Structure formats: C-alpha cells, structure tokens
Image: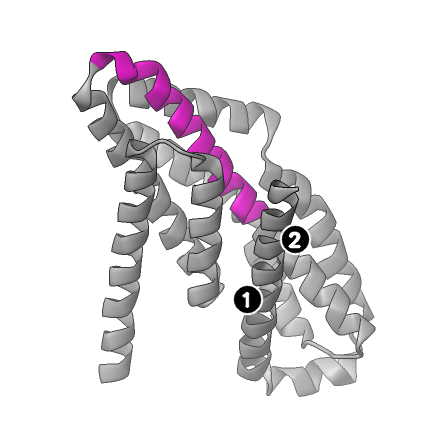
Amino acid sequence: MQNESNRTVHDQDDMAQLEADVREAIIHDGDVKETVRRLTLQSMQAHRLDIQSLGRIATAVMQGVHDGAQQKLAQASEQSNTAQTQISHAVSGLDTAFAQFAEASKLVVQEAAGKAIHFSREELTKTRADLATLEDLFIEILQQTASIATGVIAETLNDLFTHAKHNGTTIGAQLQETLATFTHQISSVGQAQFQAGLQLSQATADLLHKIAAGVLAGISEQSKHEKNK
C-alpha cells in the first residue's frame, strides 16, 4: 500500500513537472511543437503505457499550454498572434507524440511476430481497444481545455478542436495502420496459446511496456536526426 501511495505521489510530481515544462516552452517561444513532442514522449517512457496514464499526460500538457498562453497574453496585448501560433504548435506536438506512440505499438507487435514472441490474445485485444480510443481521448482533452479557457485562448483551442473533429488528426491516420496490425495478430493467435496467455497477462503487459518504451526512444532519436539533417 505504501509503495502504491509513493507511486501516486511520484506520478503527480511528474505531471506537475510536465505541465510546468510545457508552460515555460509556451512562454519562451522556441520550437514549441518539437519541445512538446519531446516532453510528451519522455513522459510516456517514464510511466506505464495505459490509457489512463496517457490521459493524465495529455491533460498535463494541455494545462501547461493553457497556462503558458495565458501568461504570455498577460505580458502584452500584442502577443495575441504569437500566443495563438504557440498554442497551435503545442497541440500539433501532442498530436504527433500520440501518433508516434500508436506507431511504436504497431512496431512492437510486428517485431514480436518476426522474432516469434507471442503476446496473449487477451493482452492484444485489450491494448487494441485502448489504442482505438486514443484519438477520441486527445480530442476530448482538447475540448475540455477549451471549455475552461477564455478569450483568444478559448477561440484558438475551439478552432483546433473543430478542425480535429472534422478533418481528423495525425493520431487517427496512424491508428488505421496500427489497429489493422493488431487485428491481424489477434486473429493469428491460436486457442491453446490464448488459454496459456491468460495466466501470463501481467508478464505480457510488463514486456509490452518495456519494448514500447524502447521503440518510443528510438522514434524520438530518429526524429531528432531527421530534424538535424
């Protein structure tokens, strides 16, 4: 129980730090999209990769975006256009990071299949179900942040929310490939393996977390190299 309490406090501290880092990125300009993408991926690598933790990460990022833009606007009224641009870039960075998480999940399953590593059907099905809600989660948190904002910030976030709803997201585009890969793997898992897999669910979840964290780190480095070319 004490360990669980310590983990909760640690997670809260991490989310508070993520929120603060995003807020500072908005205030001090720079490459906000890249900074938010990098901070989001770093937070993903440090926590269990389930839908609840992803929701907490996205909420912390968006709170940082809101507070940073609010502080920027308070400094000077002529910062309005800059704040709008920074908000758009930050949301795009979060969208990209979530899409890369979806890509990492696809790569995990493909690599495991290539090495004859078998996940249980139960874990694949649960992970696929969580991933299927990823775009909705992103859009929902974007809407929630817009609902507590005012003025230029609310207007910008509502425009981004409307665009995401009507035109889709980077997350949604990536999920088409990812979900298809999971569906294929689920259909290839035999019944005997499914029965054995039920007893190994936790071990499988731990393995999926470790491999996905490694793939995310690889994607992060790959993006960095591409950016520096």
Magenta span dominant secondary structure: helix
Res. 38 in view? yes
Q: For residue 11, which numbered disc appears in the image?
A: none
Q: Magenta stretch: residue 128 in it?
A: no
Looking at the image, is mark 2 or mark 1 earlier in the sequence?
2
Q: Tell me: 174 left or right of 95.
A: right
Position in image of residue 131 (x %, y %): 58, 54
The quarter of the image holding the C terminus is: top right
- Residue on which the image places disc 1: 213
Q: Quadrant of residue 171?
A: top right
Q: Amino acid at mark 2?
A: Glu
Q: Identify which residue is drawn at 32% across, 52% down.
A: 18
Label 2 packing within 10 angstroms: few (<14), some (14-19), many (20+): many
In the displayed orientation, state which residue is furthest to the front. 229
x, y (%) of residue 110?
76, 65
* 11, 17: nearer the viewer: 17
Residue at 71% x, 45% y is 176
What is the C-alpha distance between the residues marked 2 and 1? Answer: 12 Å
* Residue at image mark 2: 103
Taking the magenta stretch, the answer to whether it contains residue 84 is: yes
* Viewport quadrant of the N terminus: bottom left
In depth, the one of 15 and 30 nearer the eye is: 30
Specify the farthest residue to the left: 74
Q: Position of residue 48 (x, y in %)?
A: 45, 68
